[in-house]
Image (cartoon, helix red, strand yellow):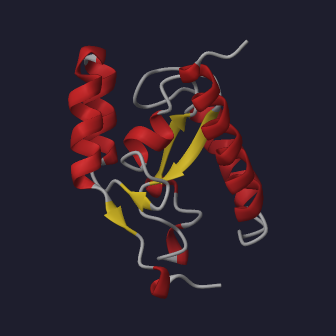
Amino acid sequence: MFGFVGLGHALRAARATVRETIKNHTRSPKWPHVRELHLAHNPTCAACGSPVHAQVHHVKPFHLNPMLELDASNLITLCMDTNECHERVGHGDDFKAYNPMIRAHAASLLADPTLRAKVEQEARVARLYIDVLQMKP
C-alpha cells in the first residue's frame, strides 16, 4: 500500500509522463533522437545522480524559444525518482514555472545532498512563471 508520500510521488510522476506525451505532439521530429543522444551521454540526474526515471529538461523552455529545443547546451538531465528533481529543482516545485538557476542548483545539490531543503527553497524563489500569452501553438 502507498503511504501518503509514496502516493503523492506516484501521482506527480504519472502527471509528468502525461505532460511529456502531450509535448511529444508539438516537438520537432528530431527531438526523440536528440533526447536519446543526450540521455546516452548524461544518463543520471544532474542534481542527485539517480539514473531512475531520468528526463531531459530544457534549461530555457523550448516553447518560449523554439530555436533552443534541440540545442544540447540547453539540456540537462533531471529525474522524477523519489527526489523528484525535475519538478522540485528544475521547476521550483511547479511545472507551470521554470528555474533559470537550474545548472547552479543542480551542481550544488549533487556536490552536497545535505543541501536539498536549501536548494529546493532557492529553486522556488528563483522560479519564473511561464507567460501563457507568449506560448506558441
Q: Quadrant of residue 11?
A: top right
In which quadrant is the C terminus drawn?
bottom right
Which residue is drawn at the image coordinates 54% and 26% (left, top)?
A: 44
Q: Nearer the viewer, residue 134 or 57?
A: 134
Which residue is drawn at the image coordinates 72% and 72% (left, top)?
A: 26
How far across and down, in percent of the image, does residue 115 sit? 23, 22
How far across and down, in percent of the image, does residue 96 sit? 47, 62
Left or right for 93, reference 114: right
Instruction: Say how many tags the image has.
Output: 0
In which quadrant is the N terminus drawn?
top right
Left or right for 106, reference 81: left
Instruction: Give the vertical position of 132 relative to 84 (above or below).
Output: below
Which residue is drawn at the image coordinates 42% and 71% (left, top)?
A: 130
Q: Quadrant of residue 128?
A: bottom left
How far across and down, in percent of the image, does residue 110 sit? 34, 23
How far across and down, in percent of the image, does residue 33 sit? 75, 52
Instruction: Give the vertical position of 53 relative to 30 (above or below).
Output: above
Instruction: Give the vertical position of 90 relative to 137 (above or below).
Output: above
Left or right for 23, reference 69: right
Which residue is drawn at the image coordinates 33% and 46% (left, top)?
A: 102
Q: Nearer the viewer, residue 62 or 73?
A: 62
